[in-house]
Amino acid sequence: MPSGGQLTAAAGSGGPGAGHGERPPVWRPGMGEEVLSGLYREVFAAVVAASGPVNGVELTRAVGRESEIKNEVEKIRHRAYVLEKRGWLVRAGDGRFMPAPGAVGRDASPASAERPRPGAGTA
């Protein structure tokens, strides 16, 4: 019975696409990109690193995939849509992606992902 409020990941599911990381959890205050895995983490990091909103082709290039191959662009765009639905990214009116305001603090840096957060995991 599915529950949208549960953050338990099916880490051992081994289903199709398992090598690309499990679906990301819904973003909540205190979460950092370290909870993301696989292409989800790569896509989120690429959006954060961009100087402004990015489209699917730009994201595909940023994660080192062939942007001339439509299927590759669609794979990356799909990851960005999932991250949007789970609160990590927002989409501009023109379809380009940018980090959600709360998901990345202005003082955030890649090193901040290594810092343990007191109280993380408490509701």
Image (tube, rainbow, N blue to C red):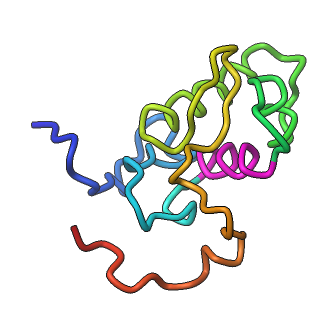
Q: Is residue 10 above or below residue 106?
A: above
The residue lying at 24 percent from left, 73 percent from top is: 122
Q: Residue at (79%, 51%) from the top-left corner? A: 49
Q: Is residue 66 left or right of residue 74?
A: right
Q: x, y (%) of residue 111? A: 70, 78
Residue at horizontal 51 percent and vertical 53 percent from the top: 102
Segment colored magenta: 38-49
Q: Is residue 91 left or right of residue 72?
A: left
Relative to 99, does residue 92 appear above or below in the rendering?
above
- Is 65 rendered above or below residue 32? above
Task: State how many labels appear.
Answer: 0
Q: Quadrant of residue 2?
A: top left
Q: In the image, is residue 119 above or below residue 29?
A: below
Magenta span includes 21: no
Q: Of helix, strand and loop, which mostly describes the magenta segment?
A: helix
Give the farthest residue toward the left: 1
Relative to 22, is 71 on the left or the right? right
Q: Position of residue 88 (x, y in %)?
A: 52, 45
Q: Quadrant of residue 112?
A: bottom right
Q: Position of residue 54 (x, y in %)?
A: 77, 30
Q: Where the N terminus falls, by quadrant?
A: top left
